[in-house]
Each structure stands twice: as C-alpha cells, then as structure tokens.
Amino acid sequence: MIECGSLEYAQARIGARQGERLRESDWQRIEVLRDLGPLLDTMRGTSLRPWLAGIDASSDAHRIESALRMRWRAIVGEAAGWMPPRWRSAVSWWTSLPELAPLQHLARGDEPPAWMRDDETWRDICAAAPAARAARLAEGPLAPLAPAWSAPQTLAHAWQAEWRRRWPDGQRNVDELLEPVAFAWIMRGKPIGVATGREAWLLRGSLRSRLALLMRRATLRPAAAFIHLVLCAIDLEQLRAELLRRVLFARWKAA
C-alpha cells in the first residue's frame, strides 16, 4: 500500500491529475464557442468542471479572476498535501505565484484595481496609504517579497530565492530538473492567455514539450510536483483567457 505523504503517493496522484488534463484538440473545440453560457456548459463536461466553481454565465471579470485565484490556491494545497512533510512548505509557496503581477503593479505606485480592494490577500495592503504599503506587506504571508518593494523588477528573483530557501537541506538537485523552466514561466515576455491564437498554440506546445521531458526524468523525485504545478498554471491561464474573452465579447455586443 502506498503511503500518503510519500513521493510514491505524490507521483501516483500527479499522474492521475495529468491524465485528466485537456488535450490541444479539446482546447481548439472550446475556442470556437463565442458566448460564455455555452462555453461553461461545454467546459463542465470536461475535467475543468471543478475549476469553474463560483463562475456562471452572469459572472463579470472580477468574479472570474477571484474564482480562478481560489482554484489555484486549491490546486497548490492539494499538491502540497500529497508530498512528504519536508517538501510542503516549498510547494505551498506556489500559492503566491499569481501575486507577483499585482504586487509589481502596486510597488510601481499604480492605484490598485477594484478586485484587489476586495481580495482577502490584498485588502489590508490596499487600504494602507501608499507610503505604508511596504510595511503592511512585510507583516503578512508575502513578507519574503517585501525587500523587493523598492525594486519591483526584482520581485521574480525574490520569489525564486524564497522558494529555494524552503527546499529541504540536501535537495539542491531539484535545480537541475526544474528551476530553469519555472523561472522561464515566471519571466515569460507574454502570457499564453494574452498571445494570439497561433502564437498561444506555439507557446503552449513549446512549454508542454519541455515539461513532458522533465516530468519523465523527475519520476519519484520532488521536482514532479512543481512540473505538475507549471502545467496546471498553463491550463489555468488558458482557461482565464477563454472566459474573459467571452465576457469582453458580451460587453461588446451589448454596446
């Protein structure tokens, strides 16, 4: 019997989740649907159904963003629970990955959008005066990123440094398997969800090919959990783009 909280258990669960992921042909069938309602009905017949909790045909962009951010936290939490205890802190840190872009936005002195003022992660920071936001950041779960507040362009490096700090001693071989791909994902010039159709297909294909190769090499190694998270992030970003595109299309039709 495979013990929960072991690398063997994690590998089995990762394999099951990866087997449920949509193929490129599935995404292509989804892309042709123009309206949000039919899109959601189709998606709920796939493995994306749990990812759509809290989203319906009346959802606006803020509600979609909030629901998907909650889903990402759930995905990371699930993966952390599969792993041996010594790895859970490093995996759990990935819940903060979507916070890099809004944090950079704030650190540059820009006003927070409405969704940030309502989000549980950002509510207190946004309520503070701009000059006090760095100190408020240093008091919360994103405290390891606070030193980069004065140099927003270094936030990705600060995130990566904290991730590495959480690795168990003696596990630096993970760097060989994952770190270059994880960092390339964080620092990519154009998110997949923002790219045009053909460009997005090429970006996804390139990343997935590299990650598939790494996943085979990472069997029964901690890196498999992080490769799984990058693959989930690719799918979540694509899902976000498909949903928001329909919201904007509906707004355009109503104008």
Image (cartoon, rainbow, N blue to C red):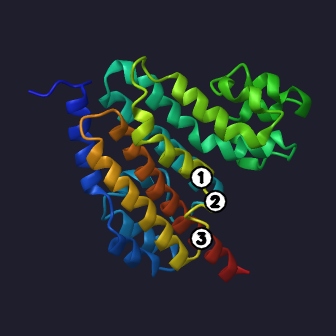
Nearer mark to the viewer, of 1 and 3 = 3
In the rendered structure, are the residues bearing label 1 and label 2 in contact, judged by CB atoms less than 8 Å apart?
Answer: yes
Q: Amino acid at mark 3?
A: Ala
Instruction: Name the residue carrying label 2.
Output: 61
Q: Please tell me which residue is depicted at 84% across the width and 33% down the height of the picture.
A: 150
Residue 250 on image: x %, y %: 62, 76
Residue 167 on image: x %, y %: 46, 24
Q: Amino acid at mark 1?
A: Glu
Nearer mark to the viewer, of 2 and 3 = 3
Picture quarter with the N terminus: top left
Q: Quadrant of residue 144?
A: top right
**219 above or below 83?**
below
**128 above or below 43?**
above
Element carrying mark 1 = helix
Residue 181 on image: x %, y %: 48, 48
Q: Please tell me which residue is depicted at 59% across the width and 70% down the height of the picture.
A: 195
Q: Within 10 Å of the Cα at label 1, are there few (<14), some (14-19), or many (20+) other Cα atoms?
A: some
In primary-sequence order, the first of circles 1 and 3 is 1
Instruction: Name the residue carrying label 3.
Output: 195
Residue 211 on image: x %, y %: 38, 53
Instruction: Name the residue carrying label 1.
Output: 65
Tell me, yes or no, if residue 39 can be seen here.
yes
Element carrying mark 3 = loop
Element carrying mark 2 = helix
- Whole-angstrom CA distance, mark 1 to mark 2, is 6 Å
Q: Within 10 Å of the Cα at label 2, are there few (<14), some (14-19), or many (20+) other Cα atoms?
A: some
